[in-house]
Image: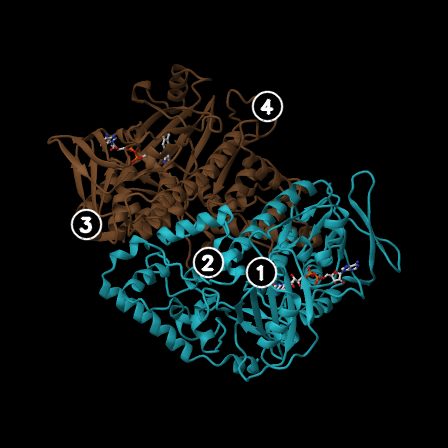
Chain colours: A cyan, B brown
Amino acid sequence: MIMPWKRIVIAGGGTAGWMVAAALARVFGKSGYEITLVESPDIGPVGVGEATIPPLIAFNRMLGLNEQEFIRQTKATFKLGIEFVDWRSAGERYFHGFGGFGTAAQGVPFYHYWLKWKKENPNSDLSDFSVTASSARSQKFIHPDSRGAAAIANMRYAYHIDAGLYASYLKHFAIALGVKHVQDEILDVCLRPDNGFIEALQLKSSNALQGDFFVDCTGFKSLLLGKALGIPYTTWGEWLLCDSALAVASNHASEAISPYTTAIAHSAGWQWRIPLQHRLGNGLVYSSSHLDHDAAQTLLLSRIEGEPLSGMKNIRFTPGVRKKAWEKNCLAVGLSSGFVEPLESTSIHLIQSAISRLVQLFPDADTNEVLARQFNRDFSSDMEEVRDFIILHYCLTERVGDPFWERCRTMSLPDSLQEKLELFRCSGRLIYEQKNVFTDINWVSVLIGQGVLPASHSPLVDGIPLRNLQTFMEKTRSEIAAAVDTMPSHQSFLARL
Amino acid sequence: MSAGIRKLVICGGGIESYTLAHRLKKHFSDSLSITLIESGNVSEPACVSVPPAAVNFFTSQGVSEDVLVGEAGGLYRTAVLLKSVNQGKDFYLPFSPPGFMLHARDFQHFYVWAHKKGLAHSYDEFSLSSMSAKRLKFLPASKDAGSLLSTLNHGYTLDVTRLKDYLRSKFQSMGGSIVDGEVSSVSLDADGCIACLDVHGIDDSSVVGDFYIDCSGEDNSNLSSALNASFLSERKSLPVDSIIRSVSSCSGSYRPFSSISLQGAGYIIEQSAQYKKQSDFVYNSGELSDEEAVNLFSEYMRTPPSDLKKLSGQSKRRNQFWVKNCIFMGASSGFLQDPFMGTYSLSQSSILRFISLFPSAKESAPLAEEYNRLTHLEYDCVVDFHSLLFRVFGLKSANARSDSFLGEAVSDRLKSRVDMFNHTGRVPFREGDPISQDLWVSTLLGSGLVPRAYDILVEGIEPKWIADQLKKMFQMIDGASAKMPYLKDYIAQGSAV
Ligand SMILES: Cc1cc2nc3c(=O)[nH]c(=O)nc-3n(C[C@H](O)[C@H](O)[C@H](O)COP(=O)(O)OP(=O)(O)OC[C@H]3O[C@@H](n4cnc5c(N)ncnc54)[C@H](O)[C@@H]3O)c2cc1C
Ligand SMILES: Cc1cc2nc3c(=O)[nH]c(=O)nc-3n(C[C@H](O)[C@H](O)[C@H](O)COP(=O)(O)OP(=O)(O)OC[C@H]3O[C@@H](n4cnc5c(N)ncnc54)[C@H](O)[C@@H]3O)c2cc1C
């Protein structure tokens, strides 16, 4: 006989808390589970986190959200990828698009053909062969579901969302499905004396909130997992130097709304530009040991377009991860379980994958330990994957002069990343692994974008005579260009929704 | 070829050699010269069985089903019959997953739920491929995605000699060269790479290549001793070491399955292609003397002992599969007593891996390292799966006297997978696993291990509705399999067209 844990308590009402609440409410439906979310009316959410990656589409679909409605409610725009400016060196830019390159012939990934082609055509740009990057460059967008050229099927997209609006959208959704919403502050976490499990949350103005299973979404505070259960934090500061961020919204300075995020390197970190329907999100991410707060503020203000719409938000963080996300009857989701850094906008995705794992591995008293072990294993491997991918952007820089970038260029790397780089450099091949967050396309875009041209490509493409390769490459490029020509601009696509 | 491998030499003339040689010719045509060395001593099997992955493998090699099942005398295979496995009952391990998802949840959870409530059907009775196999019926998957028949899957039992002859003649017609003779010695260069092979034949010669593949079968070859390549034993996980074989011509009706049945301290595996039937008695010589084994087997087969052939069959794998400029493939890469996957299927995936990592220089250490890593990952999973099958049959190695279901000889990897199954009704994914989750689940449920838990979502659904759905499913599958043609008729019809 299974004795299910039916009282679920979610602590915290930021993006993580409401995503968990909405998903669990949807999955458990009317099966007798009781879901309560408690959030402090005084302590706000972190209030950033507006760029996403494509799997969010699947999350919204799982909830049953209508895409048009979602875009209207969250003032979202489409995101085809990220444009990186000045990362390799000042003046250089590249595009990391979500969609694939060209077409795979004979089962050989397209970029191998391009690598061979590049030897004969040194000016060729890989992003010309990506429909996603090409449409982004022209400020255009079309839905991959639309009928049209075959090349369009290779489009992949995500969204830029207003974080506050997304959380309140999910809040209405969750409450409508029966989630109980408590606005109160957690003062203490009560543990059971016999086994150290969480028994209840002591609230400021009402009774203690009892539960069987607790989800810690209290942000950087990590009140339950970190503070009450004492799970230590592993820091990744030796590789990830940025530890501070400033964020400010501004109004659009021009008509065009770009369908991508821009990430511009500066002397001690980087700056983001995230276009929403009604405003731009801007932020400066930096290393506080290389740039002081006031200088950072001045730098950001000098670099934003349009007028600032709000005061500047100031956030400190420590890149790293909790040793475990799930301990006893508590699972941390969101910032409370760790944070790598904002580059490549993975944090909301990690919330989402934690949720889908939790739904698959929902525990009861007997199974809890085995399930937690499995969860923690997957969680650590996701976090390390993200860590390596982000370090890649920094360590491949060719910038000289700034102490920050000097350190990035010369630091020793995690073994997992070092091996990956070696294999790619010598052979153009990527270590094959079951990846949960990024695919080979992501890695290749950044590696090649940052100027790593491998010593050789797959010998399989050498079977093709140069003349045929020429025809193949030109045909691919012109098909993509023709498809982009037929697309509407991103703005007019949004306006039509 | 860009940088290096212009000439490839394959040592051996078995099924593996020709599969590889033909495949490489297809990919590289004239840009790679391939020489194959074969000695006349053949002791190859009559039949090998391969899982559904082989369908794509052969299609992408340009070997159509008409050839495999027509010219080359193979047969379709949709299940593996495990004789008297769970309380004396037969279980057909199916290639297409049983049942359908309900409410976006896997079927197995509903099955487990119903089983606990006394459902009479066994798990395989919900699989179209098991039910059709049991009835000796066959159809390939339908292309119509809406049809029940689109869920079908099949592999083959292949006629080794016929298929080899076919591939051999194709290889020759594509310009591949074959040297008759035996590799008698190996010369190394200063880096310890193979420089050339001396061949003793009608005319003694020496064959030079940039890269070498050792497909010389099970016995330690000259190449492996020259390169000091050693084996790891898998005896602990797969506690059988001897084989007695009987080959007869096929009579009676065609069976779309292979079968495994427990006999004494071993098992008998029977597989038949169109013209040949092969039966192997695989046993543990520590528990059964050769004489006892011969008597047992000849009684079972009703053949005189003189028609039986004794082979050795220690389970082992290479420490390293790719050493310097040489890869060990086929039986020379190792040999697992794996009645389900088969060494030939493992080699098919090694061939694909080799092609995707094809080197462009004589020695390419990072590629070799990646190849070895991936090959071991795959072997790990296959060893685990078979080690589970062995436990299912109650075969334990002599030094593992334990009452637990799994016994001590089982790896931690396998223990944690079975644990997870027991606690969640799901088998966690493992990187590199060629065996699908569905097959793991079928094997576990088929062997009588009913997990204690299943997806909690099931609890929230109206019990009567689930019961009705299961009943309907069974009727549909039962009805559809009854209407399918007999394999015999299907084949006769095909060759008439
Ligand atoms: C600079 C920066 C940029 C980022 N950019 C991106 C991005 O582009 N894309 C992306 O995916 N992610 C991004 N992230 C991460 C993203 O912002 C977070 O993952 C996301 O907002 C989820 O936060 P959270 O819900 O875990 O925590 P928070 O938003 O901090 O929420 C914490 C909640 O806990 C509650 N709480 C705290 N203490 C108590 C208490 N004592 N009692 C009761 N309630 C309490 C608060 O009221 C609040 O509701 C970024 C993060 C940073 C720092
Ligand atoms: C009981 C049993 C059941 C099996 N069932 C299956 C199954 O169901 N599915 C499956 O996929 N696999 C199965 N296998 C494994 C399969 O039979 C082998 O993987 C496969 O036959 C090995 O082929 P090979 O080409 O590597 O080696 P071999 O067939 O042994 O060929 C080796 C070749 O190399 C030549 N050679 C050797 N030394 C030299 C030399 N010095 N110079 C030149 N030439 C040389 C030999 O003459 C021969 O031609 C089974 C094996 C056994 C024992």
The reply, left or right, for residue A222 in relation to residue B162 is: right
* Residue B403, horizontal then vertical, whole percent: 61, 24
Q: Residues within 10 Å of mark 4 (few under 14, many from 20)?
A: few
Tell whether label 4 touches label 1 (CB within 8 Å). no
Front-lying residue, A63 or A291: A291
Front-lying residue, A396 or A309: A396
Residue located beneath label 2 in the image? A396
Say whether mark 4 and mark 2 are on the same chain: no
Residue B174's disc is: 3
* Residue B278, horizontal then vertical, whole percent: 34, 31
Residue type beneath disc 3: Met
Q: Nearer the viewer, mark 2 or mark 4?
A: 2
Q: Secondary structure at mark 1?
A: loop
First in sequence, mark 4 or 3: give its number: 3
Q: Secondary structure at mark 4?
A: loop
Residue located beneath label 4 in the image? B402
Q: Is mark 1 within 8 Å of ligand 1?
A: yes
* Residue A303, horizontal then vertical, whole percent: 57, 75
